């Protein structure tokens, strides 16, 4: 799980008692991710953290991915935006505490935005930022990874697969988290070449949409 912003491994004794919340130090996070270093630097490789806290593992994964995106595509804003969106679309998290999930989304967006602003300054597009915020809203969820539901509503956790097509379009399909876990217990488990073996039990299909239009609305349902 994630460490908090004050570099402490706990936020409160009550949270430890009620939820077993203990945050992982940055050194341990990097040591663990270095074990799968090649995957953390592959733009499209998918990571799921089922107890993401406020995002330490996911934040480091995103930094590594965006560094690769920047090294390869910094001379083209369009290409950088496209591959940054692909990188973010491949990062998933769940946390049982709502404030952690929200903080994680904000932290990941801020990492993206720091890279984006540094590279393109006044040329940054609000529509790109909206797309990123929308992806994080869909991919980092408040939920109980043990029973696959929201802790309050008890509705099933649903994740979206985002598949790039034709250069500019993104195809979304929704799946129940429960079936993803039943297919694999690994924390990094969606391979580019055989993701279908993990993403089954499709529950919703959507029309392809331009990657800069993802944040416009949620009405592209088929």
Image (cartoon, helix red, strand yellow):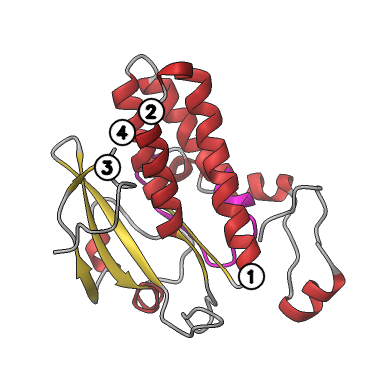
Asked whether residue 34 appears in the rendered view, the answer is no
Q: Residues within 10 Å of mark 1 (few under 14, many from 20)?
A: many
Q: CA distance from mark 4 to mark 3?
A: 12 Å
Give the percent coordinates (x, y) of residue 14: 83, 75
Determine the residue positioned at 72% across, 77% down: 19
Pinpoint residue 182: horizontal percent, then vertical percent: 38, 78
Task: Identify residue for label 1.
Answer: 97
Q: Look at discs 2 and 1 and give the one toward the viewer.
A: 2
Instruction: Compare marks 2 and 4 and give the one earlier in the sequence.
Output: 4
Q: Answer few, some or many: residues within 10 Å of disc 2's Cα (few below 14, many 20 plus, some between 14 and 19).
A: some
Q: Which mark is residue 82?
A: 4
Estimate the spatial distance between the alpha carbons at disc 2 and disc 1, rounded to whole Å. 32 Å
Q: Residue furthest top?
A: 75
| Left or right for 169, reference 176 | left
Q: Answer with mark 1 or mark 4, whichever residue precedes in sequence.
A: 4
Q: Tell me if label 2 and label 3 are in contact, CB under 8 Å.
A: no
Element type at marker 1?
loop
Q: Earlier in the sequence, mark 4 or mark 3?
A: 4
Q: Which mark is residue 125?
A: 2
Name the dominant secondary structure of the magenta segment: loop
Q: Quadrant of the N terminus?
A: bottom right
Q: Are marks 2 and 1 in contact (CB under 8 Å)?
A: no
């Amino acid at each position: 799980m994630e460490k908090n912003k004050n570099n402490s491994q706990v936020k409160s004794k009550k949270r430890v008692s009620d939820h077993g919340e203990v945050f992982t130090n940055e050194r341990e996070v990097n040591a663990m991710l270095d074990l799968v270093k090649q995957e953390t630097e592959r733009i499209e490789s998918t990571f799921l953290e089922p107890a993401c806290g406020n995002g330490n593992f996911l934040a480091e994964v995103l930094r590594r991915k965006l560094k690769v995106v920047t090294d390869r595509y910094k001379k083209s804003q369009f290409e950088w935006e496209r591959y940054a969106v692909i990188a973010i679309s491949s990062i998933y998290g769940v946390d049982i505490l709502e404030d952690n999930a929200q903080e994680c989304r904000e932290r990941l967006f801020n990492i993206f935005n720091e890279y984006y602003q540094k590279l393109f300054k006044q040329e940054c597009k609000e529509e790109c930022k909206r797309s990123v915020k929308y992806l994080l809203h869909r991919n980092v969820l408040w939920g109980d990874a043990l029973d696959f539901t929201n802790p309050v509503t008890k509705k099933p956790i649903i994740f979206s697969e985002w598949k790039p097509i034709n250069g500019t379009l993104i195809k979304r399909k929704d799946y129940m988290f429960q079936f993803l876990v039943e297919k694999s217990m690994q924390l990094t488990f969606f391979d580019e070449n055989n993701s279908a073996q993990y993403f089954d039990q499709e529950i919703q299909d959507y029309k392809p949409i331009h990657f800069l239009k993802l944040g416009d609305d949620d009405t592209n349902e088929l």
